[in-house]
């Protein structure tokens, strides 16, 4: 086990950044259903079309941010693991 931990120590920054990105991804992923709920409730209440468009735009922005953060997390974690295998 100490053999593996020696390599992990060298790349702890990448793994930590990957973990932070994964946490951010989970938080943002939880926001999408909440916004969808607000959109549905807005439809039931007869909210203004502009307000509903804001919800849709917010969901699209969160989806784009999620894509970027997920890519970063994969680059950090998988990149570090590949460098460990190379070492």
Image (cartoon, grey):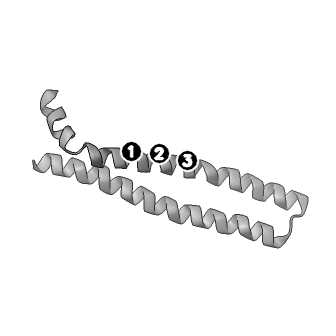
Contact (Cβ within 8 Å) of mark 2 with mark 1: yes
Q: Which of the labelled discs sits on residue 27, or is there none? A: 3
Q: Quadrant of the N terminus?
A: top left
Task: Identify the residue at horizontal 42%, vertical 56% (top origin).
Answer: 70
Contact (Cβ within 8 Å) of mark 3 with mark 2: yes
Left or right of 60: which side holds 36? right
Please state the horizontal and vertical placement of residue 65, each as a whole percent of the image. Answer: 51, 62
Left or right of 61: which side holds 52? right
**Alpha carbon distance from label 3 to label 1:** 12 Å
Left or right of 61: which side holds 54? right
Contact (Cβ within 8 Å) of mark 3 with mark 1: no
The residue where tag 2 is placed is: 23
Please state the horizontal and vertical placement of residue 14, each as a whole percent of the image. Answer: 29, 49
Task: Identify the residue at horizontal 65%, vertical 64% (top origin).
Answer: 58
- Give the secondary structure at mark 2: helix
The residue where tag 1 is placed is: 19
Task: Identify the residue at horizontal 28%, vertical 46% (top origin).
Answer: 13
The local crowd at label 2, few if under 14, some if 14 to 19, many if 20 or more residues have their Cα within 10 Å, is some
- Give the secondary structure at mark 3: helix
How many callouts does the rendering have? 3
Q: Earlier in the sequence, mark 3 or mark 1?
A: 1
Please state the horizontal and vertical placement of residue 40, each as a whole percent of the image. Answer: 79, 57
Please state the horizontal and vertical placement of residue 82, each as a whole percent of the image. Answer: 19, 51
The local crowd at label 1, few if under 14, some if 14 to 19, many if 20 or more residues have their Cα within 10 Å, is some
Residue 71 in which image quadrant: bottom left
Task: Identify the residue at horizontal 17%, vertical 51% (top origin).
Answer: 83
Q: Residue furthest top?
A: 1
**Alpha carbon distance from label 2 to label 1:** 6 Å
């Amino acid at each position: 086990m100490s053999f593996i931990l020696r390599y992990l120590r060298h790349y702890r920054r990448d793994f930590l950044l990957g973990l932070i990105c994964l946490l951010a991804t989970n938080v943002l992923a939880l926001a999408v259903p909440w916004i969808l709920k607000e959109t549905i409730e807005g439809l039931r209440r007869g909210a203004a079309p502009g307000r509903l468009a804001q919800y849709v735009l917010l969901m699209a922005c969160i989806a784009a941010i999620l894509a970027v953060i997920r890519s970063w997390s994969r680059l950090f974690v998988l990149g570090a693991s590949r460098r460990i295998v190379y070492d």
